[in-house]
Image (spheres, grey):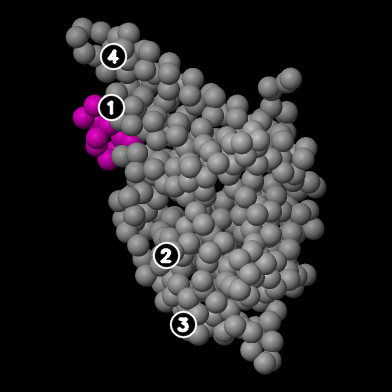
Amino acid sequence: MDFRLSPAHQMIRDTARRFVDKELPRERVLEWVRNRVEPPREVFRKLGELGLYGFLIPAEYGGGDEADPVGLAVFVEQLARASSALATIYGRAAVICGPLVAAFGTAAQKDLVLPRVARGEVVLSLALTEPDAGSDAASIQTRAERQVDGSYLVRGAKTFITQAESADFQVLAARTEADRYRGITLFLLERPGAIPNVECRRIDTLGLSIAPTYGVSYSGVALAADSVIGSAGEGWKYLLHGLDMERFYHGAITTGASQAIVDEVVTYVKQRVQFGQPLGKLQAVRHKLADMQTSVDAARLLTYRAAHALQLQGSAPREASMAKLVGAETYMRVAHDGLQLLGGYGYSVESGLPMHFADAKLFEIGGGAMEIQRNIIAKAMGL
């Protein structure tokens, strides 16, 4: 088994690291966090110019010759060093919604969306979660009633929808039939925040403030027949198609963010002198950091194993869930321990640890809670 990155993937890593160091210094990111504003679109357009949006986008729309989950993991790790929220914004377009449109959208939908995704020009949102449908996503009650002319009228409410107001495109899941699984249809909405009868209300959250989340109500929203993605009633199947990729990509985010924390703490304890010596010479500190780095390396190995499985098989529920589970729990634990090791400085916003501490909790909840991941892993074990 060869654990080395290929020359192409080493180039992706080095390019991404240079980009993060130049374009996303901590001071810039923390300014967005303090002001609770979304990053400027130019950040993502520059990533598009570097070809870093095309890992899962077909070549005819500006992506690569074939899907490259390993390259995606290499890149996302580096982006998450600056901010897990930035990587979340990126992934809505490049990992979740863009590939979904590529796999199931009409030719017109692909032509409209995918070249702009590959260029890093657009923000996408996924409107799935509802007040009474979180982990049990198949129980959604937002309804899309088909009209005589073939159009649809949508009524219902969604919650915790990332960037619903600023999104250029939204993938909306709505119920078109009573059947629990075969009654869900996906729709493509352009500029949902500007559509009449769509109301977005920002929800203040603990973290990820630069990727704002909203409650969204649809009060008789008219959608044309050609806004249906794929076939009516097949939406649940389409959503399941991309879950492994989303979960593995969460593993890459949390691995990269966790490594950023460890690197910062190591630098600090080498310089901070207490009791006549650098903190890094104290055994309790050394052992804690050794445990932190070991956990990050374990998360990384599980993430790259999932990437290789997805590359070879296209489906890897067990591996993807393990990557997400271990990555998310590592991020939360490393953020907690890192803040403790930095002491008063760690509690100050300028250290970056409060940002990570607040952001980390989301990854134990969003994209499938830890309990759901354990259920998937247990099922794969035959339990």
Quarter residue 281 falls in: top left
Judged from the image, the secondary structure of the residue bearing numbered disc 3 is: strand
> Sequence-wise, which precedes: disc 4 or disc 3?
3
Q: Specify start and end residues of the magenta stretch as a single range.
A: 343-353
User: Which residue carries the number 2 mark?
Assistant: 131
> Sequence-wise, which precedes: disc 2 or disc 4?
2
Look at the numbered discs 3 and 1 and tell me whether their residues touch, using CB distance below 8 Å: no
Q: Gap between marks 4 and 3, in whole Å?
A: 59 Å
User: Which residue carries the number 1 mark?
Assistant: 340
User: Which residue carries the number 3 mark?
Assistant: 219
Where does residue 58 sit, x and y in percent of width and height? 76, 54
Confirm whether the magenta stretch covers residue 150.
no
Q: Amino acid at mark 2?
A: Pro
Packing grade of label 2 (10 A; few <14, some 14-19, many >=20) is few
Packing grade of label 3 (10 A; few <14, some 14-19, many >=20) is some
Judged from the image, the secondary structure of the residue bearing numbered disc 4 is: helix
Q: Amino acid at mark 3?
A: Ser
Task: Report the disc number at residue 279.
Answer: 4
Nearer to the camera, 264 or 318: 318
Judged from the image, the secondary structure of the residue bearing numbered disc 2 is: loop
> Sequence-wise, which precedes: disc 3 or disc 1?
3
Q: Gap between marks 2 and 4, in whole Å?
A: 47 Å
Nearer to the camera, 137 or 256: 137
Look at the numbered discs 2 and 1 and tell me whether their residues touch, using CB distance below 8 Å: no
